[in-house]
């Protein structure tokens, strides 16, 4: 896979709490120049990016981030506002406490409600694998599939660990045929990026890929 093919799978990411507009401009300019799949940014920047760049850039934002414990109502309204502001893709965090409590139907319904709020736009579901055992990960594969989300995503990058190849292999066994995979969290080398793509990930969330490929 050549450099340009790799970049088409990258969600070029800036989610640090102290990110400034200057940081976001740098991110967006790099994404446009290198033709990454999207920029992944905090919701507070979505409208300004859309007003500044218009259709030049595919905007992804995060919902219920990074801990997932907002109410479903809040996540739905946050999603609607993000779409209204110009986001094309939504990366939501599941209610991890509900997963740990075995309330899988409740989690499925929340994902389904947020997918509806996306109004036809792409929904990626972050399950934060570092906090889950194998049974819970499998249950989330089923939940994401039943709720008709577009992607299952490993991690926020704010948890105790990020994506692993083992989790990608597990996802591939249990997700439905219409669900894609996004790996994120701790992907810091070009070898990491290539390894996750080789396992069938459609998207890679990282702040480092553009810089690595420029080098």
Image (cartoon, rainbow, N blue to C red):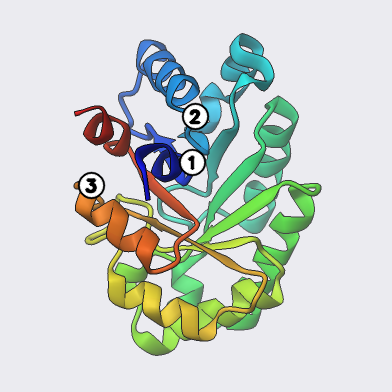
Task: Give the numbered dot on residue 84.
Answer: none
Is disc 1 placed on a helix, strand or loop? loop
Which residue position holds label 1? 8
State the residue at coordinates (65%, 81%). 105
Q: Position of residue 191 (x, y in %)?
A: 21, 53
Residue 207: x and y, percent? 31, 36
Please tell me whether residue 202 is drawn above or below residue 33 in the rendered image. Answer: below
In primary-sequence order, the first of circles 2 and 3 is 2
Image-quadrant location for residue 80: top right
Residue sitting at x 41%, y 35%: 12
Choose top left, top right, bottom left or bottom right for residue 23. Answer: top left
Along the horizontal axis of the image, is 83 left or right of 70? Answer: right
The residue identified by callout 2 is 35
Label 3 Cα crowd, 10 Å radius (few <14 / some 14-19 / many 20+):
some
Q: Nearer the viewer, residue 68 or 8?
A: 8
The reply, left or right, for residue 93 in relation to residue 161 is right
Counting every numbered tag in the picture gives: 3
**Label 2 vs 1, first from the N-terminus:** 1
Work out whether residue 183 can be spotted. yes
Instruction: Give above or below for 130 relative to 61.
Output: below
Q: Is residue 101 visible?
A: no
Q: CA distance from mark 1 to mark 3?
A: 14 Å
Q: Which picture quadrant has residue 198?
A: bottom left
Of all residues, the one furthest to the front in this rendering is: 2
Picture disc at residue 190:
3
- Left or right: 210 in relation to 102: left
Q: Position of residue 205 (x, y in %)?
A: 39, 47
Front in this rendered view, residue 19 or 40: 40
Check disc 3 and report its element: helix, strand or loop.
helix
């Amino acid at each position: 896979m050549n450099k340009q093919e790799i970049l088409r799978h990258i969600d070029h990411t800036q989610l640090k709490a102290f990110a400034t507009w200057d940081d976001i401009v740098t991110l967006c300019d790099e994404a446009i120049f290198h033709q990454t799949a999207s920029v992944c940014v905090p919701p507070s920047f979505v409208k300004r990016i859309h007003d500044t760049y218009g259709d030049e850039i595919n905007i992804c934002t995060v919902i219920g981030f990074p801990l997932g414990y907002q109410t479903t109502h809040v996540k739905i309204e946050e999603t609607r506002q993000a779409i209204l502001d110009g986001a094309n893709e939504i990366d939501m965090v599941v209610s991890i406490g509900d997963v740990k409590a075995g309330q899988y139907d409740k989690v499925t319904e929340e994902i389904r409600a947020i997918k509806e709020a996306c109004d036809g736009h792409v929904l990626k579901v972050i399950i934060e694998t570092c906090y889950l055992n194998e049974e819970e990960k499998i249950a989330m594969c089923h939940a994401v599939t039943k709720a008709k989300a577009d992607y299952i995503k490993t991690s926020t990058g704010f948890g105790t660990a990020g994506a692993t190849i083992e989790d990608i292999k597990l996802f591939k066994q249990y997700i439905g045929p219409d669900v894609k995979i996004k790996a994120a969290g701790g992907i810091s080398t070009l070898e990491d990026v290539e390894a996750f793509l080789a396992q069938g990930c459609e998207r890679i969330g990282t702040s480092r890929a553009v810089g690595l490929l420029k080098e």
